[in-house]
Image (cartoon, grey):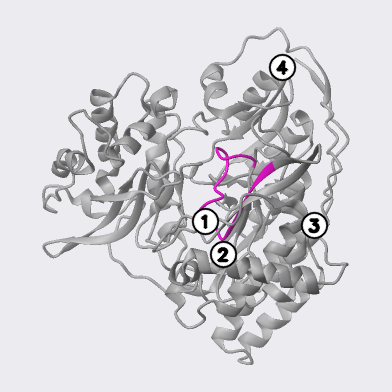
């Protein structure tokens, strides 16, 4: 059958984030480093400032992290990333939890060529790593969420543009993160340095825009939930507030103790009330002393929404197998009538170069806004897809292996890169996430409404790149020993969440890597046996932690006793596979390199 299609006119990005000269400067600096003119520490700081992160146990390769401010990415940029992954990387890319894309195992001398090519399509890796303001995030539902007060995307983009290459944010005590969201449900405003939720209020009969601002949150070896600065921050004070907080952190942050120099430690040690007062005073100084030209340049020009036109003879065909399951677990209805946001399920954020190219085509063919958004859970959202086009989009996704269901359920776990590339990782969290996803989709757990709002998040070490602290069921990696033999092991936490009731998970049990899946399934079984009619797994665990459960499971200790027989290590003779981490055929060890998060 023929299928004639005419796509909408290509949408061009409003901002060119790149600077061509940075590629030349990077090439020159690498050459000087190789010749011995740069010491290792100085070169590391320079490399990180330009988005090139160290790769596990080698100095000859880098991971290049490309920033996607507010999560926006356009079809021609997908195509360029596909080309670069083939030419300089390993034929695939990795979507992070912070709206960036990573290309791994790039030869150090090739990084400058990659930066030059990225600049041609307006993309940059500048300050994607290092002690600077990192990528400014925004919920992928911003602009389409039925519960939002207004679209925060333009404010996220303006903030990103203001701080990128800004001298005030080039040498902070540690990395610094902004997150804008749409509502309490679809964002993580309370677990970041600066989190912003759009709000409105009526003043003299007029509706005024502003934000709820949360400060001092963050995940890591020690995590904290952020504090609300004030009841309402008007939009004209957003930049002044942001500058004030960055300046305070720059001035007062701990530059000596690398393990405790994120802003959340400063807030915790100083006390919230004192820090809050300092922010408000600093903001008054900033407002009084900043030049009148220092404004947050917010472009609120609406994006043209124009459904791609197509003529097709496929309209009479029935929906392909699996469509109903995919529709339920991978799409959200937008506030715009007849339109949906479609979330593409990836395995722990991984995508092949061919799939990147295919996504570019799908955006042109199906998205009425002509671009995609990334989010907080290692996936891609194609928004403004007309409901009549959903079956055809699903068919197209099937053809390229991107039609897995479960994107918005617990069957799509988060897994950081782990020992596949990270110097600090102790376990292969990346592969474990994939194993869980494959098994749970096989069991069709994505179709279980009781599990739909729960999450599984896995980090390869305590540093929380996999966001385990805010997961319904979270894991962070380490090593354990049985007799003389070592095996990969995880600390399991329960009850974390990142919505309006943001809660950090409670450490419950040590779980060997090869027992993680069976432990999760057992938790689900116990939940099913003890749940009330309206319970979900998330609400049930939350009630146990709060001490309000009156079934046979009244505390986490009751659940722990049921799980303990599953985690007892066998002898190596009885189960040699137990002592191998996922993705490895050699004996487990805990060798790590020097981390660069605080370099």
**Could you say whether the residue bearing mark 4 is in a helix, strand or loop?**
helix
**Could you say whether the residue bearing mark 2 is in a helix, strand or loop?**
helix
481 left or right, relative to 292: left
Span highlighted in magenta in the image: 182-199
Q: CA distance from mark 4 to mark 1?
A: 43 Å
- The quarter of the image holding the N terminus is top right
Mark 3 and mark 2 lie on one chain; the one further toward the N terminus is 3
- Within 10 Å of disc 3 (Cα), the crowding (few <14, some 14-19, many 20+) is some
Q: CA distance from mark 4 to mark 2?
A: 50 Å
Q: Nearer the viewer, residue 314 or 457?
A: 457
Q: Are marks 4 and 3 in contact (CB under 8 Å)?
A: no
- Residue receiving disc 2: 276
Mark 4 and mark 1 lie on one chain; the one further toward the N terminus is 1
> Magenta span has 334?
no
- Within 10 Å of disc 1 (Cα), the crowding (few <14, some 14-19, many 20+) is many
Seen in the picture, residue 19 relative to 391 is either above or below; the reply is below
- Residue receiving disc 4: 388
Residue 533 image point, x, y percent: 33, 18
Rendered image: mark on residue 227: 1
Q: Nearer the viewer, residue 199 or 134?
A: 199
Q: Which residue is painted at 41% across and 67% down in the image? A: 424
Q: Which residue is painted at 28% across and 65% down in the image? A: 589
**Could you say whether the residue bearing mark 1 is in a helix, strand or loop?**
strand
Q: Is residue 594 visible?
A: no
Magenta stretch, overall SS: loop
- Residue receiving disc 3: 122
Seen in the picture, residue 335 relative to 78 is either above or below; the reply is above
């Amino acid at each position: 059958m023929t299928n004639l299609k005419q796509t909408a006119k290509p949408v061009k990005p409003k901002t060119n984030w790149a600077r061509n000269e940075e590629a030349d400067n990077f090439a020159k600096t690498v050459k000087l480093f190789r010749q011995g003119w740069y010491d290792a520490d100085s070169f590391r700081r320079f490399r990180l400032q330009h988005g090139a992160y160290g790769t596990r146990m080698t100095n000859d390769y880098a991971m290049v992290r490309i920033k996607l401010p507010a999560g926006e990415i356009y079809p021609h940029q997908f195509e360029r990333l596909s080309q670069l992954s083939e030419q300089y990387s390993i034929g695939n890319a990795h979507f992070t939890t912070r709206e960036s894309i990573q290309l791994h195992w790039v030869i150090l001398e090739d990084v400058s060529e990659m930066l030059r090519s990225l600049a041609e399509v307006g993309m940059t890796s500048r300050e994607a790593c290092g002690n600077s303001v990192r990528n400014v995030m925004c919920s992928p539902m911003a602009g389409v969420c039925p519960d939002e007060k207004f679209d925060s995307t333009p404010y996220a983009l303006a903030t990103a543009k203001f701080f990128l290459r800004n001298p005030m944010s080039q040498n902070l005590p540690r990395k610094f993160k902004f997150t804008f969201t749409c509502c309490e449900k679809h964002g993580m405003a309370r677990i970041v340095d600066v989190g912003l939720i759009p709000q409105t209020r009526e003043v003299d009969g007029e509706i005024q825009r502003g934000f709820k601002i949360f400060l001092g949150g963050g995940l890591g070896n020690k995590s904290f939930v952020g504090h609300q600065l004030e009841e309402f921050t008007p939009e004209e004070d957003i930049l002044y507030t942001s500058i004030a907080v960055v300046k305070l952190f720059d001035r007062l942050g701990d530059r000596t103790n690398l393990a405790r120099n994120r802003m959340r430690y400063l807030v915790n040690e100083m006390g919230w009330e004192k820090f809050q007062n300092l922010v408000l005073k600093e903001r008054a100084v900033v407002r009084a002393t900043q030049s009148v030209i220092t404004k947050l340049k917010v472009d609120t020009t609406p994006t043209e929404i124009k459904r791609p036109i197509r003529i097709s003879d496929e309209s009479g065909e029935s929906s392909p197998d699996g469509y109903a399951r995919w529709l339920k677990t991978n799409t959200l209805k937008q506030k715009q009538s007849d339109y949906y946001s479609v979330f593409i399920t990836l395995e722990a954020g991984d995508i092949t170069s061919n799939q990147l190219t295919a996504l570019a085509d799908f955006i042109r063919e199906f998205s009425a806004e002509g671009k995609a958004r990334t989010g907080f859970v290692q996936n891609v959202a194609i928004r403004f897809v007309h409901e009549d086009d959903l079956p055809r989009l699903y068919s197209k996704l099937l053809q390229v292996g991107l039609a897995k269901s479960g994107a918005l359920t617990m069957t799509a776990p988060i897994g950081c890169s782990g020992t596949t590339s990270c110097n600090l990782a102790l376990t292969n969290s990346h592969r474990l996430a994939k194993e869980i996803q494959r098994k749970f989709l096989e069991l069709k757990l994505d179709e279980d409404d009781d599990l739909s709002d729960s999450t599984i998040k896995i980090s390869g070490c305590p540093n929380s790149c996999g966001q385990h602290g805010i997961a319904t069921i979270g894991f962070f990696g380490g090593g354990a020993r049985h007799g003389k033999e070592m095996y990969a092991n995880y600390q399991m936490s329960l009850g974390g969440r990142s919505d309006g009731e943001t809660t950090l998970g409670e450490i419950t049990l040590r779980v060997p890597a090869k027992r993680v899946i069976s432990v999760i399934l057992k938790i689900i079984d116990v939940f099913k046996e003890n749940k009330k009619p309206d319970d979900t797994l998330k609400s049930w665990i939350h009630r146990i932690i709060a001490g309000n459960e009156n079934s046979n499971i009244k505390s986490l200790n009751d659940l722990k006793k049921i799980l303990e027989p599953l985690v007892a290590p066998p002898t190596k003779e009885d189960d040699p596979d137990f002592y191998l981490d996922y993705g490895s055929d050699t004996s487990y060890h805990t060798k790590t390199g020097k981390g660069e998060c605080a370099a």
